Amino acid sequence: MQNNFGLRIVLDILIFSAVIHGWWFIAVPLALSGAWKYAYFCEFIIAGIIYDSLFGLVPGNGVAGYAGIILSIVLLLLVAILKRVLRR
Amino acid sequence: MRIVLSFSIAKMTYLQPHRRPYQQFARFGAVIVGVIVLACVVIIIFAPHLFSAVFTSMARPFWRMEFSAMSGSLKSPERLLAENEELRNRLTDLELSSETIDFVLAENQELKTLLGRGNDVQTSTSSEYMAPIVDGVLAAVLKRPPVSPYDEIIIDVGRDYTISTSSLIYAVGNVLIGRVVDVLGTTSKVRLFSSPGERYEVLIGTSNTPATAIGRGGGQYEAQVSREAGVRESDFVTNPSVSQRPFAQVTAVLSDPTQPFETVIFAPMVNIYQLKWVIVR
């Protein structure tokens, strides 16, 4: 349990570092692996919010400015459903 | 004894909870996630700059450090001194070249005056185009494509300088590349004119062929022109509604013999992936 928690913190730091540098292509696989390993990996959504706050949320961009948030929610839901189906 | 054991097993089986603990935990987790998402949506709607301001101020020190590392501020003193010396030599060379340019400019101005053309019309060869930058705010580019899929750059000036969402962004060489779309405390977001879906009326080539430029992202534009227009590679592209100065150059002309139109691909005269400094006006 202790190890799991430590690993989760390390994963969070890696995701946060990738997000503030705009490396979504690194943050997404890391967040997906976190979502697969841990239940309720809400850091995924938080990462999406931070990403859009830094690089998106620009007036006039429309829904495209919320791509990070939308993608994180959709992927988190997909992983949750997939886990449920495969681990039944 | 056997009877008691079987009774206790039966009792344990019977007393197992109807709803498993993880189901309750799942519901609790889902509620937490839902509340977070709802709170974020409400904050984004009612205070759209709150998250941007908070997270940008958190990320700015990291970006500044990265910028310093990339621009060589963290090099050794010996290396910096050598680079300084080399730059001084180059500056001397450029000063000599600049004198030649000044002479040509003066001659150009004289010829224009002789032909009855003053400075009332800005052209790519007017003195203003070649003049050094004296107005505007110099800004460091903290983030640039392709790390951001939104095809924008982030600069290190914000409300602390007199810039607004209508400010235009010029790259080195006075090349117009975008405009400020969001101003935060100490940073601003700049959308490049080449952002996907952006449309501009432009004039291409020496014949000033009118066309609609569509941003393709990554500093690329495309436009459809008639085959008879005679557009060639390295032709200049201007945008009269924004500036008379050329802001792009044709990089490729894709022609299909079965089509009456050809596709012109053009890009800014600066590489947006290598931008380090820009001017905000």
Image: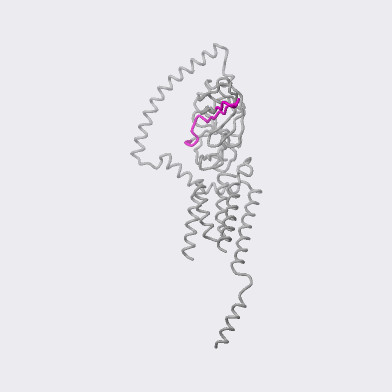
Question: Is residue B182 found inside the magenta-colored segment of the image?
Answer: no
In the rendered image, the vertical position of residue B123 relative to residue A13, given as above or below? above
Task: Give the residue drawn at x 35%, y 41%.
Answer: B76
In percent of width and height, residue A17 lies at: 48, 50
Q: Is residue B254 visible?
A: yes
User: In which quarter of the view is residue B103 placed?
Assistant: top left
Instruction: Find residue B7 and report its horizontal and vertical position in percent.
Output: 59, 84
Q: How is the image coloured?
A: one colour
Q: Residue at x 61, y 60 (%)?
A: B32
Horizontal side of residue B21 vs B67, given as left or right: right
Q: Is residue B59 above or below residue B195?
A: below
Tell me residue B128's x, y (percent). Answer: 53, 23
- Residue A82, position as x, y percentages in the image: 57, 58
Residue B167 to residue A42: above or below: above
Disc tally is 0
Q: Is residue B276 visible?
A: no
- Which is nearer the eye, A29 or B138? A29
Tell me the residue at 52%/30% (across/down). B268
| In magenta segment, residue B264 | yes
Compared with B191, B12 (above or below) is below
Instruction: Name the residue at the bottom extreme.
Output: B1
Q: Residue furthest top?
A: B114
Q: Which residues are magenta?
A: B255-276
Return the residue nearer the eye: A58 or B210: B210
B244 left or right, relative to B62: right
Image quadrant holding the C terminus of chain A, namely bottom right
